[in-house]
Amino acid sequence: MIDKSLLQLMGKNKKYIVGTVLLMILGMVANIAITASICYAVKLAIEGGELASYILPLCVALGAVVVRLVSTMVSGNLKERLGAKVKKQLRHDVYNKIVRLGVRSTNDVSMAGLTQMSLEGIEQLDMYYSMYLPQFFYSMIAPILLFALCVFLDWRVAVVLLCCVPLIPVSIVAVSKYAKKVFAKYWGLYMSMGDGFLDSVQGLKELKIFNADGSQHMRMNSKAEQFRKITMKVLVMQLASITIMDLVAFAGAAAGVGFAVADMASGTLQPYVALFLVLVAVEFFLPLRALGSAFHIAMNGASAGKKILMLLQTSEQQWGDKVADSSKIAINNVTFSYDGQRTVLNNVNMNFGTKGLYAIVGQSGCGKSTVANMIMGALTPQQGSINVGNNNLYELSRASYYSQLSVVSYNTYIFNDSVCNNFLLANPQCTEQQMYDALKQVNMYDVVEQKGGLDYVISEDANNLSGGQKQRLALAINLVANKQIYLLDEATSNIDVESEAIIMNAVRKMSKTKNIIVISHRLENVVDADNIYYMDNGTVAEQGTHMQLMDKKGGYYNLYTTQKQLENGYKGEQQ
C-alpha cells in the first residue's frame, strides 16, 4: 500500500506529511473532547446538576471546537503546501532529467507521453502525496489511540471495534493487485491515445492528401473506446470497493454499538459512558473509510509515478568538470552498437583540426549520423574514445563543451518567436547589426526585410518560411553564436540548389577560422573539403582530399561519379 520508491521522489518534503498527521491526530483528540463534553453534560442532566456546573463542559467543548477548526485549517494548508512543493520539485526533476539526457532521445517515452507525464501525471501523483499518504499514516494511528482510550471504559466494546477495523484494509489489499493492473493499463491507453492524437494532428496534411483521414478517425475512435472501457472499469472497481468498505464500517460500528447498549441494559455501563462509546465507535472506522476512498486516487497517482520514476532512472552519460581548451576533435578506434548485436561503427578513426572544412560522406546506413551523435555527446562508444583537445570528451563539463559546439541539421528547430528573439537565444549579447550581418552571409537579409524585419514572428515549425529559407535562417542564427566547432548534419538536405549553394559558400568562409564538420549525402558540396572521410558499412573505407579519393577510383569515386551522372542526366532531361 506504500511504495518506497515513490517516497524517494518527495525528497525533503516528508516533513509536511509528519506535520499533517500530527495535526489530524490533534483534530481527532479535539473531536473526542467535544464528544466527552456532550456526554458529561448528559450526565449532569441525568443527575440534575446546577446550571453553573455546565460551564466546564461548555468551555471544554468551545475550546475543542477552536482547536479542531485551527488544526483542520492548518493541516489543509500543509497539504496544499506539500502538494505544491512536490509538484514543483517533480517538474523540476523531470525537466532537469530531460535536459541532462540532452540530445539523446527517451526511447521508452514519446513526446506526447512526456507532456502528459509532466502535466497530468504529476497532478495525479500530487494527490497520492497530499491526500493518500497523510491519511494512510493517520488511519494506522487513530484506531490504536481510540482503543487505548475506550479499553478503560469497556474492554469488550473496544476489542470488538479494534478487531473490525482491519477488515477495511483487508478489503483494500484484496483489490489492490487488480487495481494496479487496471491503472497501469489505464495510463498506458491514456498515453497511447495522446500519442495517436498528436501524431494525427502533426500528419494532418498527409492524411488529407492520401485521403486517409477517415481511416485515421476510425483508429482514433477505437483508441478512445478502449480508453472509455478502461475508465468504466476503474469507476466500477471504485464503486464496488467503496460499497464493501461502507458495509464493513457500518457493520463494525453497529457491533460496537450493540455491545455498548447491551452492557448499559445489563447495568454494567452507565448511560453517558455508553453514549460516549456509541458516538466514538464511528471514529474507529472513519479514518480507514477515508483512506479507502483515497486509495483509488492513490493508485492512479502511483501508476503515473512509476512512469515518472522510470524516466528519472533512465541511465545518462556522466560528464566531468574540465574546461574545453581546444576545438580539435579526435575519434580513436571507436566501436558502437545500438542493440549489442549489429555493429554500426567498427574501429573508426577520424581527426578534425582547430580550423578547416572536414566532411563525412557515404551511402545511407554507413554510420555518418552515428558519428555525428558521438561528436554531440548523444551516444557513448562501447570501445575507443573521443578526445577534445587533450581531454576525453566526457571528462569535460557539458556546458563547457557545448559552449564551443554548434549543430545545424536538416531539422534544426526554430522557435515560434520573432527573428530577433531566435538570434538572442543563440547569443543574448547579439546586436541588431550582427544579426543583419549574419542574415546577409546566408542571403536572408532581403527575405527578412520584406517580411517585416527582425520583429517578424516565425510560426510553429517555421511553416511561414520555405525549406531553404528555414535552413538558411538556422545557419544565420548559429553564426551569431560564434562557436569554434560547427557540425552540419545534412544541413542542406531537401532544399533547393540555390539555397544549398548559398549555405555552402557561407560554410567555406567559416572554415577559414572554425572547425567545420559537414555530413552530407551530396558529394558535390564537399569537393573543397580539406579532408574527406568516406564511410562504408560502419568503417572509414577511404580518406583524403577530393582529388586524392578520385584518383583511388574506389568507393568514393564510384559514388561521386554515379551522382554526377544522375545530376547531368536530370539536367539534360530538363533541357
Image: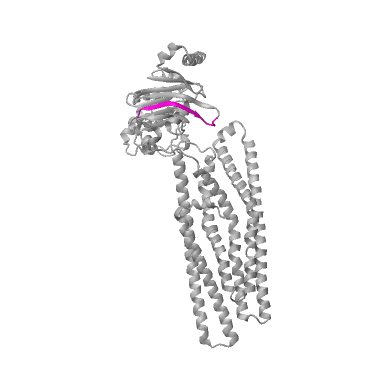
Q: Is residue 475 magenta?
A: no
* Percent position of residue 16, x then y: 47, 59
Seen at 58% across and 82% down, the residue is: 42
User: Is residue 83 left or right of 440 when viewed as pictured?
Assistant: right
Q: Does residue 499 appear anywhere in the picture?
A: no
Residue at x 53% of width, y 87% of height:
51
Q: Is residue 22 above or below residue 429?
A: below
Q: Measured from the top left, where is residue 87 in percent x and y?
A: 48, 52
Count of number-bearing discs: 0
Work out whether residue 222 or residue 137 is closer to the camera in this orientation and state it: 137
x and y percent of residue 70 in the render?
47, 68
Q: Which residues are magenta?
A: 327-340
Question: At x 38% / y 28%, what residue is drawn?
Answer: 329
Which SS does the magenta portion mostly show? strand
Check the image and report above or below for 548 versus 264: above
Residue 253, how many percent across, how many down? 65, 69
Which colour style is shown? Answer: one colour
Q: Quadrant of the N terminus?
A: bottom right
In the image, 471 versus 23, the foreground residue is 23
Looking at the picture, tell me which residue is in the foreground, 448 or 238: 238
148 shown above or below 322: below
User: In front here: 186 or 436?
Assistant: 186
